[in-house]
Amino acid sequence: RRDAGYQLYRVQAGHQPSDWKPMTSVGAGVREIRIHADGEYRVLYLATRPEAVYVLHAFAKKRQGTPKLDVDLARARLKELLRRRARE
């Protein structure tokens, strides 16, 4: 948990996380922070908005590839975020 917080702090400060990849399967601008500590963990976030870093989903990784359920959940949260931001 501490490593995830530190990596998100780096993003907020305008730096890249130590280990990341784009998650275009979720949506444009979404990235995945990869954490290798006492297991494998992932944090999916959006940092293309100037007002904030939006964490869409975080989960423990148990097998190769990102499970469809996790991708679908992050995609739904992104859709809701963009819908709310469009109303403001």
Image (cartoon, rainbow, N blue to C red):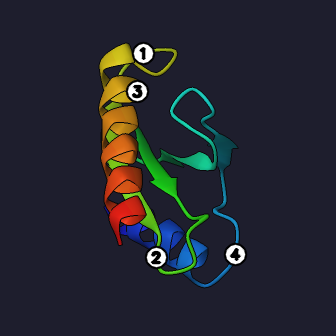
Please tell me in which quadrant of the rendered image residue 11 appears.
bottom right
Q: Rounded to the nearest whole Å, what is the CA distance between mark 3 and mark 4? A: 24 Å
Residue at coordinates 51% horizontally, 17% vertically from top-left?
A: 65
- Image quarter where the C terminus lies is bottom left
Which mark lies nearer to you, 2 or 1?
2
Residue at coordinates 66% horizontally, 51% vertically from top-left?
A: 19
Q: Rounded to the nearest whole Å, what is the CA distance between mark 2 and mark 1? A: 31 Å
Badge number at residue 71: 3
Which mark lies nearer to you, 1 or 4?
4
- Image quarter where the N terminus lies is bottom left
**Which is more toward the observer, 18 or 50?**
50
**Disc 3 packing (10 Å; few <14; some 14–19; many ≥20):** some
**Disc 4 packing (10 Å; few <14; some 14–19; many ≥20):** few
Residue at coordinates 66% horizontally, 60% vertically from top-left?
A: 18
Which residue, given by chain and number where applicable, does mark 1 sit on? 63
Q: Which amino acid type is marked by label 4? A: His
Which residue, given by chain and number where applicable, does mark 2 sit on? 52
Which residue, given by chain and number where applicable, does mark 4 sit on? 15
Question: Element type at marker 3?
Answer: helix
Question: Element type at marker 1?
Answer: loop
